[in-house]
Structure formats: structure tokens, C-alpha cells
Image: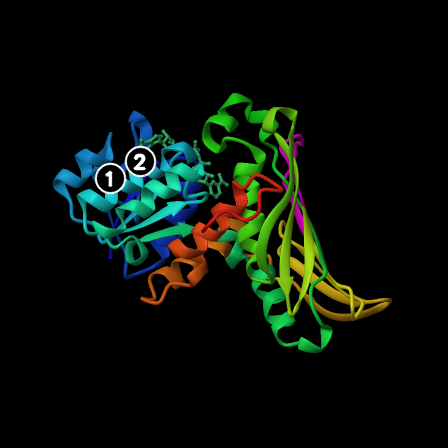
Amino acid sequence: MRVGLVGVGIIAATHLAVLAERDDVELEFTVDPRPSGAVDFRGAVPPHYGSLAAALDLHQPDLVVLATPTETHAELATAALLRSTAGVLVEKPLVHDLATLAGLRALDGEVDVRGRLFTAHHFAFSPEVEWAAELLAGHPDWGPVTTVTSAFYDPYVLRGPEAFASYVSSWMDSGVNQLSMLTRFVELTELTSARETDGGASAWCSVGFRSRGGTGTARLRSSWLTGSSSKESSLVLGRSGVEVWIDHTAMTGFAARGGELLADFGNDGRTPRKVAHYRPLYASLLSGRPDPVLGFDATATITAIHHAVPGAGRPPA
Ligand SMILES: NC(=O)c1ccc[n+]([C@@H]2O[C@H](COP(=O)([O-])OP(=O)(O)OC[C@H]3O[C@@H](n4cnc5c(N)ncnc54)[C@H](O)[C@@H]3O)[C@@H](O)[C@H]2O)c1
């Protein structure tokens, strides 16, 4: 698997760490307009280019990974799809608006968008999320999820305008993580309210969902107004009185009913959080049968809700 990595910023370090672990992967090239972008990969420095076009003139990768600022994703993905035969893994969110999603879908006759374009919905692979999803799947007797409350905080206030340039807004950056995480538990239906504050650095949104024949609401808080990262979600299964609490920062969780502890989850503390997300993500992507949460159809559903206007109903996915 010859991989080309485009965008050598913060999250690229995690991609490189996970790719370097895999003996089925070679890093064919890196791309970043920043001159200091060249990287060491297993003790060697692969060819580095200032643009994707320059790299694709000289290489035929099997996979192009796009880890660039959010607003560049669609244009670079289009170039990778049209100018190579590679699979394309794009950092989340795939697009920053619905028109851009429509543009990618329109490429479908020309290239195999569904077979080649994937979005790195990494939160869906976090160990505590996979644990909680398996726990709920094993307990139909607990009934439907009725309420979810999820709060994602990132210390990006310290990065100032740079954070907006890379991630656009808190809802753009964390909202997609919250939505992709939720798809492990419930079927999302529509954005029912959305309020962005602090110039886009904070958000308070709610999303309707279906679960085991019932309906419920997820309340999603995100904000950059903090000096530390903290991410937690609580799932309430109101009919049975069960609550599942997952801490995405510590990658831990527990389930309780009243004063009774029903199940718990921890880890050995050895795996950094982002590696714990991207290791199973790459294992799935490179397995030949990628998890549907990485695929274009799931991305279209998540994007439609992410960018919906509350009250206008669910736009066509
Ligand atoms: N930082 C995280 O924890 C994190 C986690 C998951 C996903 N993401 C997503 O990954 C993407 C990148 O985030 P980041 O934190 O690494 O941002 P970053 O700003 O640290 O890195 C982006 C890099 O892309 C380069 N770049 C810009 N335009 C380019 C182009 N046209 N071609 C090639 N390189 C280009 C920049 O020079 C920079 O080095 C964002 O969409 C973000 O939402 C970030």
C-alpha cells in the first residue's frame, strides 16, 4: 500500500505514527506548501512536494490521505480522485458546506466516489465508544436510548485565529465528531436546534434520533473556551433506567442503574488517545471491507444533519 500524505500538520503526526506501525504500508510522498513539511518515516525522508498536483505528476499512490485545513478538503479530494486511481481518505469533516458535498457527489459518474472516497470519522473508532456500542447491542432488554448529552471541549482559544483557519468553528470541528460517534448507538434523523456563540468558538445543538422503535434527543455542547481538552457523553435508556457514561478523554466508561454498577471499561494507559482512534480506523480501511461509517453514504447523512437548518426538516442525503 503506497500512501501519499497531504498536509503535514498536527493530526498528520498521528497518521504517520499509525501508518509506520503497519508493515503493509510504505509512505510514497508527503505534500505541504510549508517548506519545513518533510517528515521522517521509519528512518527515511520520503519525497516531499509543495502541491498535490506536483506529487501526482510523479507518483501512483494506492491511497492519498488528506490532513489539511477543513476548507481545502473538497478541492484536494476532487484533484486526488480525478488525477489518480488511489483511494482517498479525507480528514473529517469531509466538506464545510452542503454545496461542496453535492459537487463531490456529482463526480460519481466520472469516478467511483463510493468505492474510493472515505472520511476519517475517527471518533466512531474510539475504544470507549466501541465498548459502549457492543454493550448496548448485547442488551436489547435495556430498551431504547432516550436522551444523549455530549460535551466536547478543546483548548483552541489559545491558538486564536489559527484555530478558525484550520477548523472553521467548534460546531464544524467537534459537531462532526459527536455525530459520527452517535451513529454507533442511534439512527440520527434531524438537527432540531443549533446555536453558535463566541464567534463560532462554542455551540449548543440538538439532534433527533431513532432507537429501538422509539425516538430521542441528543444535546450537543462544544466549545474552545478552555485551557484543557475534555470530552464526555452520557446515554440514558429511560425505559430501563440504565445510564451509560463514556469519557472520551480518558477512554473509559461505565453503565449504571440507580446505585448499581452494571459494567465498566478502562484501558492500560499505554496507547495515546488519537492513536487509539486511528489504529482501528486504518485497520478497517485497509481490510478491504471498510466500516460503513468511513464511506460516502454515511458521510452524506452526517453532513446533511451537520449543515441542516433547524426546523427545515432533513435535507436529502
Ligand atoms: N488536530 C486534531 O486533533 C485533529 C483531529 C482529527 C481531525 N483533524 C482534522 O484534520 C485537518 C487538519 O487539522 P490539523 O490540526 O492537522 O491542522 P494543521 O493546521 O495543524 O495542519 C494542516 C496542514 O496542512 C497544510 N496545508 C494547507 N493547505 C495545504 C494544501 N493545499 N496542500 C497540502 N498541505 C496543505 C498546512 O501547511 C498544515 O501543515 C482538519 O480538517 C481537522 O478538522 C484534526
Q: What residue type is labelled 1?
A: Ala
| Magenta stretch contains residue 266 | no
Q: Position of residue 116 (x, y in %)?
A: 29, 54
Above or below, 260 against 151 in this view is: below
Relative to 33, is 132 on the left or the right?
A: right
Disc tally is: 2
Residue bearing mark 2: 75
In this view of the protein, which residue sits in the foreground, 144 or 214?
214
Q: Is mark 2 within 8 Å of ligand 1?
A: yes
Q: Where is residue 72 in the image (x, y as percent from the top left)?
A: 36, 33
State the residue lying farthest toward the right.
259
| Magenta stretch contains residue 231 | yes
Residue bearing mark 1: 79
Which residues are the magenta region?
220-233
Q: What element carries label 1?
A: helix
Query: Which residue is rendered at x = 53% and y = 39% of the image?
Result: 173
Would residue 244 be seen by someone viewing this image from the given angle? yes
Please say if the residues under marks 1 and 2 sit with CB atoms less than 8 Å apart. Answer: yes
From mark 1 to mark 2, how far is it between C-alphas?
6 Å
In this view of the protein, which residue sits in the foreground, 267 or 76?
76
In this view of the protein, which residue sits in the foreground, 307 or 78?
307
Q: Quadrant of the image for the N terminus?
A: bottom left
Badge 2: residue crowd in 10 Å (few <14, some 14–19, many ≥20): some
State the residue lying farthest toward the left.
58
Q: Is mark 2 on a helix, strand or loop?
A: helix
Query: Which residue is rendered at x = 61% and y = 73% of the image?
Result: 137
